[in-house]
Image (tube, rainbow, N blue to C red):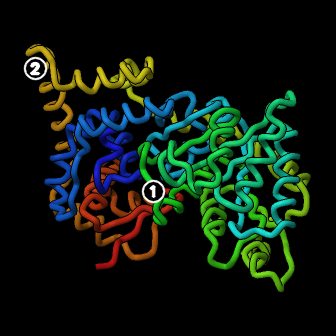
Amino acid sequence: MRLARSTNIGPVTFRKMLERFGSARDAIEALPDIIAQAQTARKIRLSSRAETVSEIETAQACRARPIIFGDPEYPALLAQIDDAPPYFYAIGKTELLGKSAIGIVGARNASATGCGFARKISHELVSSGFVVVSGMARGIDGAVHGAALQLINKDISGGTIAVLGGGVDVVYPREHQELYERLCDQGCVISEMPPGLKPQARHFPRRNRIISGLSFGVVVVEAGRNSGSLITARFAGEQGRDVFAVPGSPTDPRAAGPNSLIRDGAILCDSADVILDAVRRAEQNTHLFEEIHSFNSEGCANHPLHKNKSFDDIIASIEGDTVMSDDKKTTQESDKEELLSKSTSTETAGDDTEKIFELLSASPVLIDELIRTSDLPAGQVSTILIELELAGRVERHPGNRVSRIAN
């Protein structure tokens, strides 16, 4: 949690660091050396223990539970995306996170017809045992959640999940207070943001990638040409998920988004049956996602965070980091020296770092192709890319690709 909240360490860098060093604890130990190698002017500040404890206590106060990447409860489909959140908070029925889901998004200023259609397909999908995912916004989102909640007590296995742009305890918009309370009680509300954080415009695209990441496919009901719903559709396409679009009148600006998606190859959606047929075919390929998010090292497996995620255990573990016996200190220092020794043996001089950088351009390239072209070991290339990313010289893209950042 400290590593994930550190400045300029996003979800992709977080994941690459865990793959490289085996655990967040070891990655934090190695971070100063990585920063020194990168010679970066970017501000990289590790989140403090006090900040982490404060966040956990705030989450505890609002009944929010942390779901951490690598946990059995972490949704396998979400874990498959390149920028999966290191952890997120959930309130409500977390068992819904393990069910097959469909995202439904659309305009905030939706028409009565659009809201009616959204309710209809939400009702039919939940009745068929699926979970519908949306963002609890005005318009289409609210209609989707409301229709799903009407079926909760009717002996069905479906449900609804709301992904928020702010903290999991922050109701936005305010008029959805009652809907939020029902979702916390009968559905599930999640957010990767710290509890208490008020949503800002820049948070919603990050929220949208989670809506699509949780889902086998995303349905766009109504959306203008600049709607955030189209961002969700784009994320779905990049993540390899189906994109469904509900056609509308060419004279209605709210139909411009779905109509353009259909023109670009989205699946025309005029009923829930279209979605069910496509998703059932996709479900047959779930073996592609098996164990894709199981990377925890043995060193992490016995950590209290993974053995028993009670808040008291987590806080005790964090506070316990500051108090240890001399023998334990000696052991950890020895382990750190061994780790840094291994890291040093695979790190290259500045000429290899520049070699990798020179092979990059503004056009994203597959990292596997970069490894082949550079003729350097995969672990060495991975370390160099982490250094270049922390230095603000490269950026990662979906599909395990990377590109140079223009000066």
Could you say which disc has been placed on residue 65 in the image? none
Question: Which mark is first along the chain, 1 or 2?
Answer: 2
Vertical side of 362 occupied by 55: above or below: above
Query: Closest to the observer: 231 or 376?
Result: 231
Image quarter of residue 43: bottom left
Could you tell me residue 377's position as x and y percent?
32, 50
Q: Looking at the picture, which amino acid does disc 1 mark?
A: Asp
- Residue 153 in sight in this render: yes
57 or 121: which is nearer to us? 57
Classed neighbour count for the residue bearing mark 1: other residues with Cα under 10 Å, few (<14), some (14–19), many (≥20): few
Give the vertical position of 229 relative to 87 (above or below): below
- Mark on residue 330? 2
Quadrant of the drawing holding the N terminus = top left
Residue depicted at 35% across the width and 24% down the height: 314
- Asked where in the image residue 339 lies, by quadrant, the reply is top left
Tell me the CA gap for discs 2 and 1: 39 Å
Q: Residue at x 40, y 76 (%)?
A: 362
- Residue at the extreme bottom: 251
Q: Position of residue 342 (x, y in %)?
A: 21, 37
